[in-house]
């Protein structure tokens, strides 16, 4: 007999938040914090989710009353939590006006975002809005936007014209100074639409920075079957996550309106930067390094990759000798203990986080995850063989052929261009030089300094493979 479909047991509170980019991460992180904060302290903080591109999440969630299961996967077993804080899911391309009206509703006080790095339509190397981006070109000429910055600006315009207060824009993406980045792209776009609007947003709007952390791999069909076996209900869109979670939020909201996230473990702080840098460089930096090297070495998941002695030792070397020395930790935090905890989180075999998934969008991720540390190390005269090998592994990866000669399904907004640059060059030196010329990723001075070392690392990868090249760094 087929299992019953998951259904709502409680009414969600009235909406106070619109969330743009309703992926698994937000449903396993911000939504769970918000649900717990409302249960603890009350407040009309129900969430309206918006998918900016496709209807899949809405189609899965709507028949089950927008509820879903969050499955916590610890090394010792799984625990299922029903999540009922979502009130509705809108699909932006189907009805942009409905999304704008939801965002302009006076009851909405916060718009949260998980739109991934590329969703900001910025230049990853500088953080500035890319005015040649096709979505931005579209949004400049239309009141019905397609980009997230476009939705933010047009909705704030409606609020301004109606004499309402702005909402707080709360970005939850893995970008350094993410609040400053989103404020920058919103103001840049608004000033081209209406300078008066940009002034109002600049003065009255708030864009707190955040550091978000929880490992949430993409949900697979096996996960759906597992949740059904565990709960006895069919959930078409459950989310899988590790037990750990962290959220550091700059406490700067329009009219101080926000859920009581602090009551359920979020850290409301005045300065997020040390948290962001630590997390982006230690966790995400190591993730990207393991993703490219692990994928090339034939490993499917992060836990498999760190269980490989060569790559496990490699990542511990990266943390201790190349990344931590360039960081100033948040108050009271030991980077050695943080690295140790990351090692245990990455090793959790219950989390099947694919190297291929993390390898996506490398052009948008490398600057803040890897190149920022590399630049700091160069200034301080500290060697970075592991970070250089990581960049070389990314170059090898975007070349599109793995170590066994099989094609790689490279997902990246610059994939075609990167592939053409790689294919257009013959030798390791020429391939490295061609890829280093992509200014959206590599500033010119850094490219010049790295060229020789990268060519050597690339040649070594070709000759010895990812596993042996990573292993050689730890035994040097
Ligand atoms: C990962 C992140 O996919 C990726 O690039 O590095 O999603 C990572 O799992 C989260 O940031 C953890 O908080």
Image (spheres, helix red, strand yellow):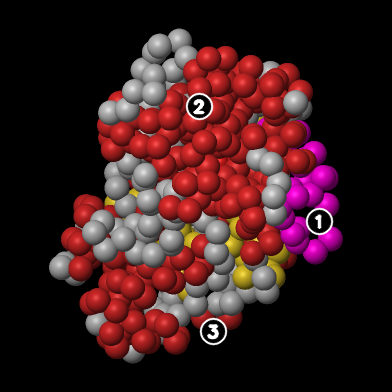
Q: Element under label 1? A: loop
Location of residue 162 (image quadrant): bottom left
**Residue at image coords 37%, 44%:** 437
Q: Is residue 457 above or below residue 128?
A: above
Q: Earlier in the sequence, mark 2 or mark 3?
A: 3
* Residue count near mark 3 (Cα–Cα under 10 Å), binned few <14, some 14–19, many ≥20: some
* Residue count near mark 1 (Cα–Cα under 10 Å), binned few <14, some 14–19, many ≥20: few
Marks 2/3: CA–CA distance: 53 Å
**Residue at image coords 44%, 76%:** 167
The yes-or-no answer for disc 2 within 8 Å of ligand 1 is no
Q: Give the residue pinned by disc 1.
A: 333
Find the magenta span and give its range: 324-346
Marks 2/1: CA–CA distance: 36 Å
**Magenta part, dominant SS:** helix
Percent of width and height locating residue 452: 52, 36
Marks 3/1: CA–CA distance: 31 Å
Q: Residue furthest top?
A: 404
C-beta proximity under 8 Å, tags 3 and 1: no
Q: Give the residue pinned by disc 3.
A: 255
Left/right of residue 416 with respect to residue 400 in the rendered view = left
Tell whether position 330 is magenta.
Answer: yes
Percent of width and height locating residue 182: 44, 66
Percent of width and height locating residue 42: 62, 69
Q: Give the residue pinned by disc 2.
A: 458
Q: In this rendering, does residue 369 appear at all?
A: no
* Residue count near mark 2 (Cα–Cα under 10 Å), binned few <14, some 14–19, many ≥20: many
Q: Element under label 3? A: helix
Question: Which-is-in-front pick, marks 2 and 1?
Answer: 2
């Amino acid at each position: 007999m087929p299992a019953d479909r998951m259904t709502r047991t409680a009414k969600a509170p009235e909406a106070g938040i619109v969330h743009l980019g309703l992926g698994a991460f937000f449903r396993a992180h911000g939504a769970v914090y918000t649900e717990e904060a409302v249960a603890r302290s009350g407040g009309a903080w129900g969430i309206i989710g918006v998918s900016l591109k496709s209807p899949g999440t809405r189609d899965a969630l709507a028949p089950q009353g927008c509820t879903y299961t969050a499955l916590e996967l610890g090394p010792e077993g799984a625990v299922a939590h029903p999540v009922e804080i979502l009130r509705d899911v809108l699909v932006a391309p189907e009805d942009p006006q409905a999304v704008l009206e939801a965002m302009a509703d006076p009851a909405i006080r916060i718009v949260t975002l998980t739109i991934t790095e590329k969703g900001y339509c910025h230049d990853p190397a500088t953080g500035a809005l890319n005015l040649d981006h096709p979505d931005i070109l579209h949004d400049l000429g239309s009141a019905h936007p397609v980009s997230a910055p476009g939705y933010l600006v047009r909705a704030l315009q409606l609020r301004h014209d109606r004499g309402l207060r702005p909402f707080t824009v709360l970005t939850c993406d893995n970008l350094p100074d993410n609040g400053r980045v989103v404020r920058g792209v919103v103001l840049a776009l608004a000033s081209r639409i209406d300078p008066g609007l940009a002034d109002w947003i600049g003065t009255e709007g708030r864009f707190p920075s955040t550091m978000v952390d929880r490992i949430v791999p993409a949900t697979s069909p096996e996960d759906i079957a597992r949740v059904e076996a565990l709960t006895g209900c069919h959930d078409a869109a459950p989310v899988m996550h590790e037990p750990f979670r962290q959220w550091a939020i700059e406490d700067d909201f329009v009219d101080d309106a926000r859920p009581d996230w602090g009551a359920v473990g979020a850290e409301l702080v005045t300065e997020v930067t040390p948290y962001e840098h630590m997390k982006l460089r230690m966790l995400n930096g190591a993730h990207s390094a393991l993703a490219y090297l692990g994928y090339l070495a034939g490993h499917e998941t992060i836990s498999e990759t760190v269980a490989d002695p060569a790559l496990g030792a490699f990542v511990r070397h990266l943390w201790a000798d190349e990344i931590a020395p360039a960081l100033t930790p948040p108050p009271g935090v030991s980077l050695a203990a943080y690295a140790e905890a990351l090692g245990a989180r990455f090793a959790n075999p219950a989390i099947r986080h694919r190297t291929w998934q993390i390898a996506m969008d490398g052009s948008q991720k490398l600057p803040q995850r890897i190149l920022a540390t590399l630049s700091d190390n160069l200034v301080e005269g500290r060697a970075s063989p592991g970070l250089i090998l990581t960049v070389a592994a990314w170059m090898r990866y975007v070349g599109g052929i793995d170590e066994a000669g099989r094609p790689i399904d490279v997902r990246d907004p610059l994939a075609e261009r990167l592939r053409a640059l790689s294919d257009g060059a013959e030798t390791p030196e020429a391939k490295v030089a061609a890829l280093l010329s992509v200014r959206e990723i590599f500033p010119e001075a850094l490219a010049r300094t790295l060229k020789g070392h990268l060519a050597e690392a690339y040649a070594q990868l070709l000759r010895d493979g990812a596993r042996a090249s990573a292993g050689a760094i730890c035994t040097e």
